[in-house]
Amino acid sequence: MERGVENMNRFLYSKHQWLNDNERVCLGESLVKIVSLIHKSGKVWMDGKLSNVIYFPTDYPEWKGIDFEYSLDEGVEIPSDHGCTIAYAPPELVKYLFDEGEEKKGDDDQTLLSSKSMDMWSVGVCLLEIVTGKGLGENMELVRGKDGLREFYCLESDKEIEEKIGKMLMRKLREEKHRHLKRLLSELLVVDGEERLKIGKVVDHSFLTREKGTTTKRMMNRLERELESRNETKRQFDDMKKRSEEIKATLETIVDEEGITQDLVENAHFMVIEAHNSPYQIPQYVQQNQVHQQTQQDYKSISNQVIEFVDELEGLKERMEEDQKERFHDITKMMIRASNVEEMRDCLKLVERLYEEFPHLNEEERVLELREDIKKLISDLIPHLMRFENKDIPIHIMTINKECENTNQFHELERMLRDLTRYFNQL
């Protein structure tokens, strides 16, 4: 009989800090393949979790699913005493087993049928854990662990569950590189099981497939473009080499006349060698990298602003009309599915528009709170002022420190707080 040596849960938590993004994608792909095979057989796993995925070091090493004690055929009634792991179970199953259990006794109409969509919620939780190193309860910061999740599912409405999970995804997966996973989880961690992605869609999702072959293709495309401009680029670097040689000769003359250190001459010589050996790469790659970094910074900055507005609106929900609540719910969905800077900007416009519809009755109290938040953030930033490459940032921070005491404008203070938060995230 085959025996596994390590489950995915133990492997993940012992290796997580050493895994790169592609390795995490590979773990997710192995899990999805297992669920796909189970669903093709007409079964529902009902207990999909990382500790039930085991590594088998055979002639063809692979991850395999185990522990099908709770598995059922699709579409059969789930017994009221059926087991599940709350940390990975979907809300409808947790409510059925732990919230409505007493009411179901004596009422045969209250039943729940097994569905493959239940496994898809579990897949979403597992993928979140693979990438962040934390389960859904920990990421949601529910202090009571599985009991916290049970109360969360049983006491909150479906819309509130989706909104809070959406905000959590925005916080935990706010980097531009996580946009594929964020979009996937927004379609898996959905309360309505009918709306969850089926396993076939997940297998082909960009989160699991974007690395396959695309790296090689991108490299070949770059090489093609570089070869096309080879003559022009070579001429540019020949000019650079010539100028560097002239600089080197000039420096050698200055050494004798002015006593300039020999290190400077050696550095110039090193620049000549680099220019000679790398005539096709430097400018293009530097420019591409700068554009990519700027895109990531813009995406993160705008998403932070969206989260701030959503947090403010969360406290105003009791004053919302029904249509405003619907718009707020749509905005939370939109923000977790935004996959690029433009979509995130559109989301920011919508949330700002909704926010402006609410008169701030306790503005004076809010002004005091904002001032306090600004002062605290400035006190955290002051020890690190010298770390900023842009020397205008420390000056702006000290200007905010003075101006925040002299303004009572709510939106002006909010702008100051957003600027400080952006600077803090750059550290």
Image (tube, rainbow, N blue to C red):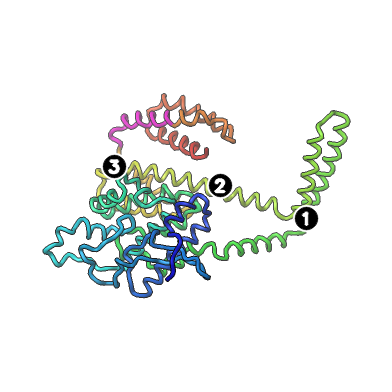
Q: Is residue 136 left or right of 208 when viewed as pictured?
A: left
Q: Nearer the viewer, residue 314 or 141?
A: 141
Instruction: Find the magenta span and give its range.
Output: 360-376
Q: Secondary structure at mark 1?
A: helix
Q: Nearer the viewer, residue 327 or 164?
A: 164
Q: How far is disc 3 from disc 2 in space, using C-alphas?
A: 34 Å
Q: Which residue appears at 44% of the width and 64% of the height? A: 4
Which residue carries the number 3 mark? 316
Of labels 2 and 1, earlier in sequence is 1
Q: Nearer the viewer, residue 289 or 342?
A: 289
Which residue carries the number 2 mark? 294
Q: Secondary structure at mark 2?
A: helix
Q: Are marks 2 and 1 in contact (CB under 8 Å)?
A: no
Q: How far is disc 2 from disc 1 in space, using C-alphas?
A: 28 Å
Badge 1, how many Cα within 10 Å: few under 14, some, many 20+? some
Which residue carries the number 1 mark? 234
